[in-house]
């Protein structure tokens, strides 16, 4: 079974630009979550999508947005990039069996904002 | 304020030397506590989810336990391949809309 894939793996942008990151979950998983990881702030939750609906949202500005398509693939968009947006962006897909939730992370997209 | 802390920040163990990592949390409305391991340059690898105080989960040399205020990750007879950063996270809030990660514990197991 293929794992979670993220594209692109690496990206360099300049301040003020926008960026779109893509995540393909494991087949059959309907939940996709996005996270930002930086050395200073650690791992922070961005948002979660389930069946094309945003289910939860972390404490990030409106420049960060996302969506999920009918095939569960998800995209994350960051507009008006700032230097502080440089980070590893991780996506995870999950499934729930009974009360047990299991989550699988992708390798991440490393974004550098210059 | 909702908060998740982990201790120690870093831990060096000899191969075979068992120990425990701690994850303490102050949140309201805990839905679940998650443990992950993360190797350098890779995404986290899910280990366990714990939902209620007294619950325990085991996987190979790892055992996770949960109380009302904290969780422990016990590592029995660790091997060098157990070296990684171990992260815990909680999902909480009235609508379970908060996901908060701890800063992690960096574990090094020396042969």
Image (tube, coloured by chain):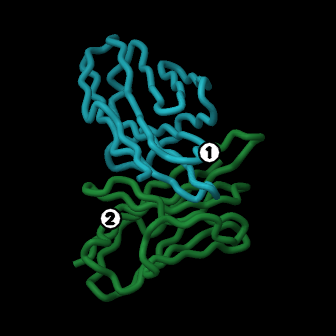
Q: Which residue is mark 1?
A: B31
C-beta proximity under 8 Å, tags 2 and 1: no
- Residue shown at 60%/28% (left/top)? B53
- Residue shown at 25%/76% (left/top)? A83
Chain letter for the green part: A
- Residue shown at 52%/71% (left/top)? A22
Could you tell me which secondary element the residue under label 2 belongs to?
strand
A41 to A15, vertically: above or below:
above
The image quarter containing residue A36 is bottom left
> Could you tell me residue B38's position as x and y percent?
39, 42
A100 to A84, vertically: above or below:
above
> Could you tell me residue B43's position as x and y percent?
43, 50
Please tell me how crowded label 2 is: few (under 14), some (14-19), or many (20+) other residues with Cα within 10 Å. many
Q: Residue furthest right?
A: A98
Q: Nearer the viewer, residue B11 or B102?
A: B102
Q: Colour of chain B?
A: cyan
């Amino acid at each position: 079974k293929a794992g979670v894939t993220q594209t692109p793996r690496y990206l360099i942008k300049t301040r003020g630009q926008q960026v779109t990151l893509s995540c393909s979950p494991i087949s059959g998983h309907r939940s996709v979550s996005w996270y930002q990881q930086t050395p200073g702030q650690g791992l922070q939750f961005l948002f979660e999508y389930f069946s094309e609906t945003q289910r939860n949202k972390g404490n990030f500005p409106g420049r960060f947005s996302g969506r999920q398509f009918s095939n569960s693939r998800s995209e994350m968009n960051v507009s008006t990039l700032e230097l502080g947006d440089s980070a590893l962006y991780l996506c995870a897909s999950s499934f729930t069996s009974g009360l047990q939730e299991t989550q699988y992370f992708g390798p991440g997209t490393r974004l550098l904002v210059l | 304020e909702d908060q998740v802390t982990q201790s120690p920040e870093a831990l060096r163990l000899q191969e075979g030397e068992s120990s425990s990592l701690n994850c303490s949390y102050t949140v309201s409305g805990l839905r679940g506590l998650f443990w992950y391991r993360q190797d350098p340059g890779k995404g986290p690898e899910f280990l366990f989810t714990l939902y209620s105080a007294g619950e325990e989960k085991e996987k190979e040399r790892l055992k996770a336990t949960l109380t009302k205020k904290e969780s422990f990750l016990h590592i029995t007879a660790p091997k060098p391949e157990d070296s990684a950063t171990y992260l815990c996270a909680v999902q909480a809030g009235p609508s379970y809309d908060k996901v908060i990660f701890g800063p992690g514990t960096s574990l090094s197991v020396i042969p």
